C-alpha cells in the first residue's frame, strides 16, 4: 500500500514521535508497516522516508542502503567529529535542495520489524540519510539545520524550478 505524504506544514512533522512498543497492539503489523513504507519510499523515488511523513505517529523509518533498511526506535550512540557538507532534499519539501552539515560517520542502534536490536556503523550517504530520517522522528526538518544564506538561495531556486515545472505542465496539456 502506498501512503500519501502529508504537506510540509502538517503538525505531525514538528513533534517527536513516540517509541514503537512491540508488545502492544497496533492498528498495523510491523511487517506490513515496513513493507508499506518501503513501497511508498520507492514510489516517490526517495532515499528515505519516516512514518510521520505519511501521517503515522510511529517511531520508524526506512532508508535505501544496499537494500531497503527498516529502523524501529532508532538512535545514534556515537558520531564522528569529521563533518561533511552535502546537498539534501526531502520528499516533504519537493524541489528544495539545501547544503547541510552532518557528521560523516555514525554508530546507531535500532530494532528491525521483529523487534530484534541491531548496532551498525554507517558512513557517507547512508549515515546522512539515517540522520535526516531520525530528525523527522524527532520533529526536526532539515531546513532548520541549514545556513540561512544557503536556505534563502535554495528557496529562490525552488521557486524558479516550481515555476518552470508548472509552465511545462501547462504546455503538455
Image: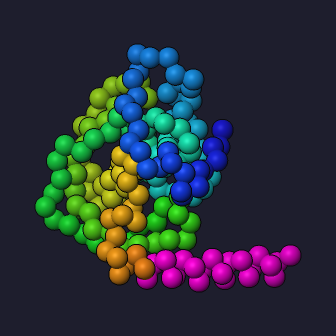
Q: Quadrant of the C terminus?
A: bottom right
Vertical comparison of 66 with 84: above or below: above
Res. 126 in view: no
Q: Which of the two residues, 47 or 166, is positioned nearer the viewer here?
A: 166
What's the image's color scheme? rainbow
**Quarter holding residue 88:** bottom left
Describe residue 47's horizontal placement relative to residue 169 as left or right: left
Q: Position of residue 9 (x, y in %)?
A: 53, 56
Q: Main secondary structure of the magenta part?
A: helix
Q: Which residue corresponds to the image point at 38% horizontal and 42% vertical from the top-left?
A: 16
Describe residue 43's horizontal placement relative to residue 86 as left or right: right
Q: Which residue corresponds to the image point at 31% horizontal and 36% vertical from the top-left?
A: 110
Q: Position of residue 89 (x, y in %)?
A: 46, 66
Does residue 91 belong to the magenta stretch? no
Q: Which residue corresponds to the image point at 49% horizontal and 77% vertical from the top-left?
A: 155
Q: Position of residue 82 (x, y in %)?
A: 16, 65
Q: Which of the two residues, 7 or 74, is positioned nearer the viewer here?
A: 7
Res. 50 in view: yes
**Quarter holding residue 113:** top left
Q: Quadrant of the N terminus?
A: top right
Q: Residue furthest front?
A: 11
Q: Residue furthest left?
A: 81
**In this picture, which residue range is highlighted in magenta?**
153-173
Q: Position of residue 136 (x, y in %)?
A: 41, 50
Q: How many marks?
A: 0
Q: Which residue corresponds to the image point at 53% horizontal and 63% vertical from the top-left?
A: 93
Q: Residue furthest right?
A: 173
Vertical comparison of 74 with 90: above or below: above
Amino acid at each position: 500500500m502506498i501512503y500519501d505524504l502529508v504537506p510540509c506544514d502538517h503538525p505531525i512533522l514538528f513533534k517527536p514521535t513516540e517509541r514503537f512498543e512491540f508488545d502492544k497492539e497496533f492498528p498495523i503489523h510491523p511487517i506490513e508497516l515496513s513493507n508499506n513504507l518501503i513501497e511508498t519510499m520507492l514510489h516517490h523515488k526517495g532515499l528515505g522516508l519516516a512514518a510521520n511523513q505519511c501521517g503515522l505517529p510511529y517511531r520508524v523509518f526506512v532508508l535505501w542502503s544496499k537494500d531497503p533498511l527498516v529502523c524501529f526506535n532508532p538512535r545514534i550512540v556515537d558520531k564522528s567529529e569529521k563533518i561533511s557538507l552535502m546537498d539534501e532534499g526531502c520528499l516533504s519539501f519537493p524541489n528544495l535542495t539545501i547544503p547541510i552539515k552532518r557528521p560523516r560517520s555514525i554508530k546507531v542502534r535500532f530494532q528491525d520489524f521483529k523487534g530484534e536490536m541491531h548496532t551498525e556503523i554507517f558512513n557517507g550517504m547512508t549515515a546522512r540519510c539515517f540522520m535526516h530520517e531520525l530528525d523527522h522522528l524527532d520533529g526536526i526538518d532539515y531546513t532548520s539545520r541549514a545556513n540561512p544564506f544557503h536556505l534563502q538561495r535554495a528557496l529562490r531556486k525552488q521557486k524558479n524550478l516550481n515555476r518552470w515545472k508548472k509552465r511545462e505542465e501547462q504546455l503538455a496539456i
